Amino acid sequence: MSGALVIRASDPSLARRSITKIAGAVRRFGHQPVRPETIEGAQGFSVAKPGAPRALVMLERGDEVVVAYGADSARAALAPSARLDADPAFRSARGALAGGFSPSLYVAVAPILQLARSSGAGASPGFQRAAPYLDAYRFLVAGGRREGGTTHSRLVVGLR
């Protein structure tokens, strides 16, 4: 199992300071050593629990903040083989948002359920009871737009 979260920061200097502060907090309060990391030109740190197959990696590069489970996941997030806006499922979700709203959050449900099923969680009775309801969801997308002095937000849930 691996994966990464990529966040676009509106202020790159804030992203850099945040990674530095988080690394400092982990050093002070964590029980695992913090190692500096540089991957694909991004700077940050990693922390690994003994016996864990991968380290948690946090990096920043310009306006990107990456939180990944393992260096390979971080590398893939920083140098993706495809862009999200090329994914037909994302384009469908973005279209559902409509009205001049720009997506700021997108969650594709199927890969999350696939991960749960493949990791063994799918065998739990609770998951099995919830699965028919969860399978009904395609995506969740949220976005906003400014109009004059007012900020509008919209959340759309895509159903099958």
Image: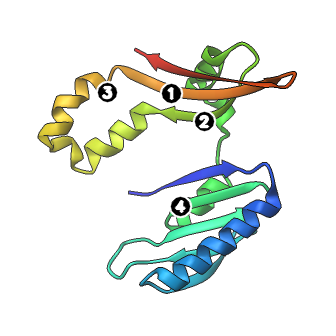
- Tell me how many marks there are: 4
Q: Do the CB atoms of the residues marked 1 and 3 lie less than 8 Å apart?
A: no
Mark 2 highlights which residue? 105
Crowd class of label 3 (few under 14; some 14 to 19; many from 20; radius 10 Å)? some
Residue 131 x/y as whole percent:
24, 29
Crowd class of label 2 (few under 14; some 14 to 19; many from 20; radius 10 Å)? few
Q: CA distance from mark 4 to mark 3?
A: 25 Å
The foreground one among 132 and 29 is: 29
Quarter of the image where one finds residue 125: top left
Q: CA distance from mark 4 to mark 1?
A: 21 Å
Q: Amino acid at mark 1?
A: Leu
- 77 vs 119, left or right, is right
Looking at marks 4 and 1 on the same chain, the residue that comes earlier in the sequence is marked by 4
**Residue occupying the point 57% across, 33% down:** 106
Looking at marks 4 and 3 on the same chain, the residue that comes earlier in the sequence is marked by 4
Looking at marks 2 and 1 on the same chain, the residue that comes earlier in the sequence is marked by 2
Residue 158 x/y as whole percent:
48, 18
| Disc ID at residue 68 | 4
Q: Amino acid at mark 3?
A: Leu
Crowd class of label 4 (few under 14; some 14 to 19; many from 20; radius 10 Å)? many
**Residue occupying the point 68% across, 14% down:** 98
Q: Nearer the viewer, mark 2 or mark 4?
A: 2
Mark 3 highlights which residue? 134
Mark 1 highlights which residue? 140
Q: CA distance from mark 2 to mark 4?
A: 18 Å
Vertical comparison of 48 with 135: above or below:
below
Q: CA distance from mark 3 to mark 2?
A: 19 Å
